Image (spheres, helix red, strand yellow):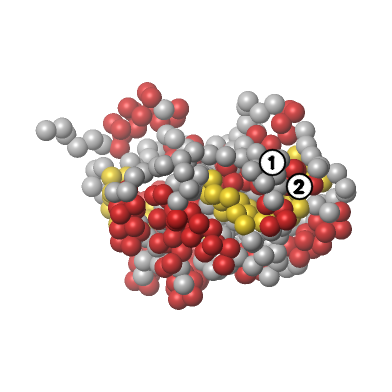
Amino acid sequence: MTDTPTNEALFTRAKQVMPGGVNSPVRSFRSVGGTPYFVDTAEGPWVWDVEGRRYLDYVMSYGPCILGHANPSIVDAVSVAAGRGTSYGAPTVREVEMAEEMCRRVPGMEMLRMVSSGTEAAMSAVRLARGFTGRDTIVKFAGNYHGHSDNLLAAGGSGIANQGLSGCDGVPDGAVADTVVAPYNEIPELDETIAAVAVEPVAANMGLVPPREGFLRELRQACDDVGAVLLFDEVITGFRLARGGATEWFGVQPDVWCFGKVIGGGLPVGAYGSSREIMASVAPLGGVYQGGTLSGNPLATAAGLSALEQLDAAAYVTLERLATRLADGLSRVFAEAGVPVVVPRVGSLLGIFFTDVAPMNFDQAQVAADNGLYRIFFHGMLERGIALAPGPYEMIFVSTVHTDELIDQTIAAAAEVAPSLR
């Protein structure tokens, strides 16, 4: 019988066969220090590590476990689907049903193409925008993360900021020559060379930075004025903010959407979509090529359909109520302890900055994130059985299975940690 491994021993083994011992950099704990816990199992709002420790989880796979871990309906749907085969490389009924459901929910989106990740969705959406407009230049905002494709990594928010990096080696100058980076919450100067403006409608990869009043509407108008495509990256906000995502929440309709996270119910999946006119540019209808053997994977679509079916109006009321309770409680206990804190919230999206003033852009978010206080907060909460994302540029994700009692326990734990941050 093999002895139960420790987190330390597993991390040592992992570093011999994976760069930094992880398959995604933030998991290495580089920005907070210490040894990562290796998850053995998860259920509801809880995860257990290989040493048997239980944590109340606010990572939630960075968003997709919006209904909690091992949601029974999702597990059943995946189990039935797996029994019929795990991949075909051929069309299936569920991918049609998934596309229909997403188009029903999102105002203005008429067609979509499924892919296997948010990065792939954003990369493909940019190619679509360029193919449709016949233009090359892309505008993005500093601190907005659109995955790790070369031309979108510039000033890419949490994807690189958590590692203390200013850019990415291996990305040639030519790859970003047609990428213009603008400050978030400011309208960039656009002209007829711009193919698309890509934006996170709520910046969720530099902590949480909400759009200022009117920002998205002004951006919509600026794109219309020069014939540029407005691209909403809803990998975080899509189907978490509301049934129809950020379009429903803000009442602003982009030309192209990117989705991920929630639509997979915990399995790897993504999608990009638009109007029929724009999507007609995608092969086999048009000249913009994009394909993938695992696109529309039967397990991912089974999980995604189950997740979307459960995300009804009541679910969004629950999510926002719980997030509000947590945000208000955290603000209160840090104020009582004399610790400057800002806990921004948009719907059920939640962040935390240990600073006096809410950041409005990436430069301001960096100042708040790099003061070292999040590291203390993270480890203080982890010692008390509360798992947060191991990086100051990430989000706090509540799920429908985080109860009022568990939220109150979290606030009480934060009250214990707060004096150490003074």
The answer to whether one can see residue 142 in this image is: no
Q: Name the one closer to the observer, 401 or 261.
A: 261
Mark 2 in CB contact with mark 1 (< 8 angstroms): yes
- 206 to the left or right of 101: right
Q: Quadrant of the N terminus?
A: top left
Above or below residue 361? Residue 289 is above
Q: Residue at x 80, y 52 (%)?
A: 228
- Name the quadrant containing residue 370: top right
Q: Position of residue 175 (x, y in %)?
A: 71, 31
Say which amino acid is labelled 1: Val
- Name the quadrant containing residue 167: top right
Q: Which residue is drawn at 75% across and 43% down?
A: 130
Above or below residue 256? Residue 295 is above
Count of numbered badges drawn on the protein: 2
Above or below residue 321? Residue 303 is above
Q: Name the one closer to the observer, 82 or 358.
A: 82
In the picture of the structure, the residue carrying the numbered disc 2 is 132
In the picture of the structure, the residue carrying the numbered disc 1 is 288
Above or below residue 49? Residue 7 is above
Q: Which residue is drawn at 54% across and 62% down?
A: 100
- How far is disc 2 from disc 1 in space, using C-alphas? 8 Å
| Label 2: few (<14), some (14–19) or many (≥20) C-alpha neighbours in 10 Å | many
- Label at residue 104: none
Q: Which residue is drawn at 66% across and 59% down?
A: 201
Say which amino acid is labelled 2: Phe
* SS of the residue under disc 1: loop
Q: Position of residue 248 (x, y in %)?
A: 62, 69
